[in-house]
Amino acid sequence: MAYSKTQRELLAAERLKATGKLASEIAHELNTPLGGILMYSHLLIEDLNEDDPRRENIVKINKLAHRCKIIVLGLLDFAHQEIPQLRPVQINRILRNVIGFLEDHILLRNISIETILDPALPLVAGDENKLEQVFINLIINAAQSMDGTGTLTLRTDFPGDTKRVRIKCSDTGCGIHEEHLSRIFEPFFTTKEKGKGTGLGLSICHGIVEQHGGTITVESSMEHGTTFTTFLPVAEKDRT
Ligand SMILES: Nc1ncnc2c1ncn2[C@@H]1O[C@H](COP(=O)(O)OP(=O)(O)OP(=O)(O)O)[C@@H](O)[C@H]1O
Ligand SMILES: [Mg+2]
C-alpha cells in the first residue's frame, strides 16, 4: 500500500514516540546497574598495584562501562527524562561558541564556515549546554557528510509571525536518501560504518529541541546537500 507524504510523516512521528518510550525504559533499567559496574571497577582499580597484570582488563571494563553510560545518557536525553533548565539565551552566541570549539576539529579543517546571524535575534528560552549539544551534533554530521571539503552555513532569523527563532544548518554534503529521511531521528539509526556512528546524535537533538517546545526538520537532496531547520520559542519577556 502506498502512503501519502503526510501519512508517512505521521507514521514516522508515531514510531519515534514508541521508540522514545522503549528507549527511556531501557535506559532507566540500565542506569543503576551501570553505575554499580563503574563504581566497583573503579574501586578495584584503586586496590590493585600499578604493575598488577589484572589491572589492564579492569581498566577496559571501566572504560567500556563509561561508554555505555554515555549511550544511556543520550537515550535519556532523547526520551526527555531530564527537565531542562530554561533561561533566556542568545542563540547567536551559542552558535559562535560552538564554532569556536569545533573549528580546529580535524573534520572541519578544510570546510568553509559561513555564518549569517540576525543581529536582532530575540532571546530564546533555553538550556545553553543542551542547545550547544544540538548544534555540535548537527555540525559534526554536516562535516562528516562533506568528507573534508565543502561549505557549512549557519543562518539565524526571526520570522516575526511565529514567535520562534529559526536556525538553519546547511551543508553541501552527500545528502540523505529519500528512504532514510523518515528514520534519521530514530535512536541507533545510522548509515555509518560499525564503530563510526552510534546513531544517537540526531535523536538527542530531536529530544532536546522538543524539551524546549521547538521543532527540528530536515530537507535534503543528493546534489545540493542537507539543511536542518530548528525553531525554538522566544523567551517570554522577549515575545512581541
Ligand atoms: N548532514 C547530513 N548529511 C547527510 N546525512 C546525514 C546528515 N546528518 C545525518 N545524516 C544521516 O543520518 C544518520 C543519523 O545521524 P545521527 O547523528 O543520529 O547518527 P550518526 O551520525 O550516524 O552517529 P552518531 O551521531 O551517534 O555518531 C547518519 O548516519 C546519516 O546517514
Ligand atoms: Mg551524528
Image (cartoon, helix red, strand yellow):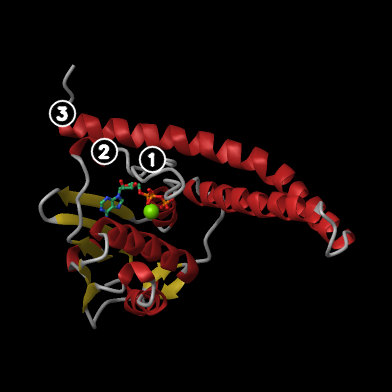
Query: Who's the residue at 42% across and 68% down the image?
Result: 132
* Mark 2, residue position: 180
> Given the current orientation, which residue lies at the most extreme left position?
223
Circle 2 crowding by C-alpha within 10 Å: few under 14, some 14–19, many from 20 = few
Tell me the number on the disc at residue 4: 3
From the top left corner, tell me how far across and down residue 15 is, in percent: 38, 32
Residue 235 visible at all:
no
**Badge 1 residue CB within 8 Å of ligand 1:** yes
From the top left corner, tell me how far across and down residue 58 is, in percent: 76, 51
**Tag nearer the camera, 3 or 1:** 1
Q: CA distance from mark 1 to mark 2?
A: 9 Å
* Mark 1, residue position: 189
Circle 3 crowding by C-alpha within 10 Å: few under 14, some 14–19, many from 20 = few
Tell whether 8 sits left or right of 48: left
> Given the current orientation, which residue lies at the most extreme top position?
1
**Badge 3 residue CB within 8 Å of ligand 1:** no
Amino acid, disc 2: His
**Badge 2 residue CB within 8 Å of ligand 1:** yes
Q: Are marks 1 and 2 in contact (CB under 8 Å)?
A: yes
The part of the image, by quadrant, that contains residue 154 is bottom left
**Tag nearer the camera, 3 or 2:** 2
Tell whether 159 sits left or right of 108: left
The part of the image, by quadrant, that contains residue 181 is top left
